[in-house]
Structure formats: structure tokens, C-alpha cells
Amino acid sequence: MTEKLPKDERFGLIGQMNRSAVSIPSNIAEGAGRNTDKDFNNFLGVALGSSFELDTQLVISNKLEYVNDQDFQKTEKELEHLQNMIVKLKLSLNSK
């Protein structure tokens, strides 16, 4: 999606969105490699935060008309699904 954004956003939205998107699975992976559920839960929180950051950047991109409504809605729905999965995983760790 970031390839569709204007090139002058390379160091702005494009960079931020790419970093946020990479941060989500990276923090999940790092947390999974930790020794305790508490550590894993903390990293899941960071991943969730990155997903909300990406969501905000997506909204901004749509409002600036860099991303059309159809792509926005599709990606928004996928991101919401991912956020729900992270929250459920966090809840399962907390219920142990």
C-alpha cells in the first residue's frame, strides 16, 4: 500500500507505516522467545500499540486521499482482525 503513496512521503508516512507494520510481527516474535508469559504479554502490548499506530497512519493516508476508500476499508478490516487476535492472545496469557 505504501508504494501507492506520493514519493515525497518517503520519509514521512511511508517510513512510519513500514516501521509500524514491521514492528507488529517483530514484537510478537521477540515476546514469544522470552522466558515468561509476563514478558510475552508486554511485547504483545507493544505489538498492539504498533497496530494502532499503523491504523492511525492509514486513516491519515485516507483523509489525505493517498489511499482510496476501498483499499482503506479492506486494510482497516484486516488490521482490526489482527488487533482482535492479539487481544485474545493477551487475555489467554492473563488467565493462566
Image: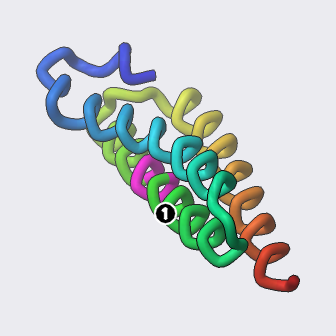
- Residue 25 is left or right of residue 18, and the answer is right
Image quarter hosting the N terminus: top left
Residue type for callout 1: Val
Question: In this orientation, which residue lies closer to the viewer: 29 or 75?
Answer: 29
Question: In this orientation, which residue lies closer to the viewer: 46 or 4?
Answer: 46
Q: Position of residue 36 (x, y in %)?
A: 69, 72
Instruction: Please provide the residue range marked out in magenta.
Output: 51-55
Question: Residue at image x 12%, y 21%?
Answer: 8
Is 45 magenta? The answer is no
Question: Residue at image x 49%, y 63%?
Answer: 46
Instruction: Report crowding for label 1: few under 14, some 14 to 19, many 20 or more residues within 10 A (C-alpha).
Output: some
At mark 1, the secondary structure is helix
Q: Position of residue 79 (x, y in %)?
A: 62, 46
Q: Residue furthest front?
A: 35
Magenta region's main secondary structure? helix
- Residue 93 is left or right of residue 75, and the answer is right
| Residue hosting label 1 | 46
Vertical relation: 47 (above or below) 2: below
Question: Residue at image x 65%, y 77%?
Answer: 38
